[in-house]
Image: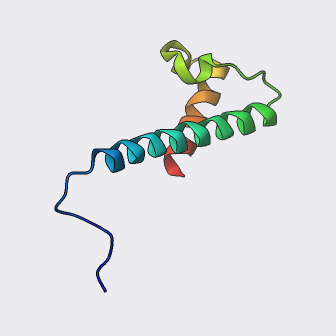
Amino acid sequence: MAGQFRSYVWDPLLILSQIVLMQTVYYGSLGLWLALVDGLVHSSPSLDQVFDAEILGFSTPPGRLSTMSFVLNALT
């Protein structure tokens, strides 16, 4: 009984779909962690928490919350 996995064939559709899936899982779980952390401290969510590099500084409270969310996302 032969399986359907082909390790000797280049399958760009499979590779592309795996990349898209991994990015979707990463940003989806990051969004959930950010929403959870923001909900716990009653902060307003913002897209800057994900895409702005300046907010990742550990010197401000929003920066600490974003950094904590990124660390929790990396651990899950």
Can residue 69 be seen here? Answer: yes
Residue sticking out furthest to the right = 42
Q: Quadrant of residue 25?
A: top right
Location of the N terminus (image quadrant): bottom left
Can residue 58 be seen here? Answer: no
Counting from the top left corner in percent of width and height, residue 63 is at: 59, 22
Above or below 17: residue 37: above
Q: Residue at the spot x=59%, y=36% of the render?
A: 68
Above or below 5: residue 68: above
Counting from the top left corner in percent of width and height, residue 27 is at: 55, 36
Residue 44 is left or right of residue 58, and the answer is right
Q: Residue at the spot x=73%, y=23% of the render?
A: 45
Q: Residue at the spot x=64%, y=29% of the render?
A: 65
Tell which of 2 and 45 is nearer to you: 2
Counting from the top left corner in percent of width and height, residue 10 is at: 20, 51
Residue 49 is left or right of residue 71, and the answer is right
Q: Residue at the spot x=30%, y=68% of the render?
A: 5
